[in-house]
Image (cartoon, helix red, strand yellow):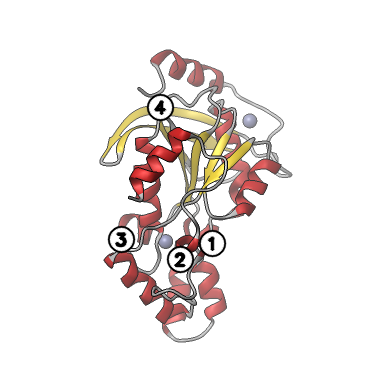
Amino acid sequence: MGLPPLKIKQLLDENLHHECEGVGPEHVCVSIAAIANLPSRFGDFQIVAFYNNKDNKEHVAIVHGDVTEAEDVPVRVHSECLTGDVIGSLRCDCRDQLESALRMIGQMERGILLYMRQEGRGIGLINKIRAYALQEQGFDTVDANLALGFRDDEREYSVAAHMLMSLHVKSVRLITNNPKKIEDLTQHGIKVIGRIPHIMPPNEHNQFYLETKAQRSGHLIDFYGRERLPEQADPPIVEGMDEEVLAVIRKYYR
Ligand SMILES: [Zn+2]
Ligand SMILES: [Zn+2]
């Protein structure tokens, strides 16, 4: 069961004329514009669409279960990547990260994936493709690496934080390998109880693209034991996870 109809009505009503002093130095304010069911190949979800006063992007929350007034809600913040998410590009691991997070959340009692429309870490699609092209010419790898980085854009945490507040989430458990994300969300007023490491289980497919990435961008990746990306090296289970989360993780990485 997802958000019950009464809760949906309540959320829509209170967001109709929502105004607040905003989150962060830029006084970011968001409001829920629409909610609908979204059955998917990764599980049953509801999609919550938001307006915000910061950019003209339509950020969404993909919600599983009733997350309102809930504690310890697993949350993944995903940054849009057209080439990875939609086209299945092997130049990055965005699609694997997205699918893995949705599959994991879909199996839990409740959880949220915030899909942030910040292509190429906020630099936009054109600049990301420019960085790809530069990389192919064999120079400016610093810029190329920045544009191709694994990490989500930290500049958008104010929007993400307010989205979680709009959903009346009481506390979250962040699905991430990046402790800085936890800090940033906490600074913006979100109670982060802990984290769930986000690991891409190595397989034929991601081995290929990680090797491609190693060749193309000079990242130090060795799939056979030595230097690895944090995404691959992180233990899937960390201290403080509750039994419900552990059960899903164990099943997932079996
Ligand atoms: Zn607001
Ligand atoms: Zn990507």
Mark 3 burial class by Cα count in 10 Å: few <14, some 14-19, many 20+: some
- Number of marks present in the image shown: 4
Q: Which residue is mark 2?
A: 126
Q: Residue furthest right?
A: 25
Kind of residue at disc 3: Gly
Q: Amino acid at mark 2?
A: Ile
| Sequence-earlier tag: 4 or 3 | 4
User: Circles 1 and 4: CB distance less than 8 Å?
Assistant: no
Mark sitting on residue 123: 1
Q: Nearer the viewer, residue 45 or 105?
A: 105
Distance, label 2 to label 1, CA atoms, is 8 Å
Name the residue carrying label 3.
Answer: 88
Secondary structure of the residue carrying tag 4 is loop
Displayed-image quarter of ligand 2: bottom left
Q: CA distance from mark 1 to mark 4?
A: 33 Å
What is the distance, in whole Å, between disc 4 and disc 2 at their CAs? 36 Å
Location of residue 87 in the rendering, given as x and y in whole percent from the top left corner: 30, 60
- In x, y percent, where is residue 189? 68, 36
Circle 4 residue: 65
